[in-house]
Amino acid sequence: MRLHFYKYQGTGNDFILADNRNKEYSGITAEQIRKLCDRRFGIGADGLMLLNEKPGFDFEMKYYNADGKEGTMCGNGGRCITKFAYHLGIHKEEYYFLAADGPHLAEIDMDGIVSLKMKDVKYIRKFHNDYILDTGSPHYIKMVTNVADTDVYKKGYEIRHSKEFEEEGINVNFVEQLREADKIFVRTFERGVEDETYSCGTGVTAAALVCYHNENGFNDVEVKTLGGNLSVEFDRINDTSYENIWLCGPAEKVFEGNTEIN
């Protein structure tokens, strides 16, 4: 099968994308996806996405992790596929698309920044001295004092494969509160990639919710990642309710090409 692909990245979180509105690539296999995402023997990416047609929506986002398995919601992926839709000629003031965790809205501003509305969060669970929540994908939040010197792979792997989380898996985020009350630095070990990624949209969102600076009402948290800067805007209703959550940042096309996959 000949694949016409596009490579996009959102703060270093990179993806292979394909226009599947004619269902040409619907038969792609997990093994083929693993090969395509391999950074030494393939194109190289944190995941692969297919843009599908879906009645009642502008498009459907079908996301696969680098291990070839169908994934849950990917925030940076959602922002990248929105920019991809625009480049394919789907021009909207507001995009309405379907992802693994349900419908999403997205917007592209005049500077090319893509803002993605995430699902509401109704529960944050305290786990020892850390936090667990679901922002479309499950996330573990661990606060640290110096995230730059944290061994994210070793410590993230240990938590992700601990007896509590090994079966379903969890993404592990190490978060440092910076001097400014509304700024944090986040590094993430992602399940499915099984390594640290340069950025994780749902992880950044989860970390921002934990690190709110306004007790109730509007919050705008700036987030530093290895791949660049993002922001998360949301309304904190109370300890258990977070609404109107928007993940905002750049999403860029890197290149496009063709490859044969067997």
Image: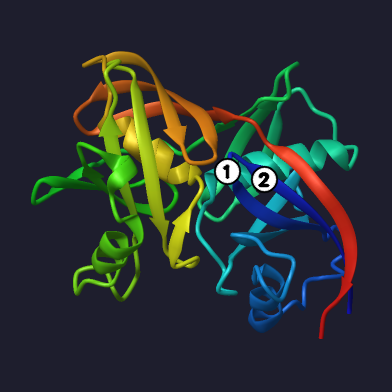
Q: In the structure shown, which secondary structural element does the residue marked by tag 1 occupy?
A: helix
Mark 2 or 1 closer to N-term? 2
* Residue toward you, 47 or 243: 47
Give the x, y percent position of residue 196.
44, 57
Q: Quadrant location of the N terminus?
A: bottom right
* Type of amino acid under label 2: Gln
Q: Quadrant of residue 26?
A: bottom right
- The furthest residue to the front: 149
Q: Quadrant location of the C terminus?
A: bottom right
Name the mark on residue 9.
Answer: 2
Give the x, y percent position of residue 145.
20, 36
Vertical placement of residue 57 versus 224, above or below: below
Q: Quadrant of residue 5?
A: bottom right
Give the x, y percent position of residue 150.
28, 49
Q: Could you classify mark 2 by the number of other residues whose Cα lies within 10 Å: few (under 14), some (14-19), or many (20 or more)?
A: many
- Residue at (54, 34) in percent of width and height: 228
- The furthest residue to the left: 128
Give the x, y percent position of residue 86.
82, 36
* Residue toward you, 253 or 244: 253
Vertical placement of residue 145 versus 188, above or below: above
Spatial distance from mark 2 to mark 1, Cα to Cα?
8 Å
Q: In the structure shown, which secondary structural element does the residue marked by tag 2 occupy?
A: strand
* Residue toward you, 158 or 168: 158
Q: How is the image coloured?
A: rainbow
- Of circles 2 and 1, the one toward us is 2
Name the mark on residue 223.
Answer: none
* Type of amino acid under label 1: Asn
* Residue toward you, 191 or 61: 191
Q: Which residue is mark 1?
A: 76
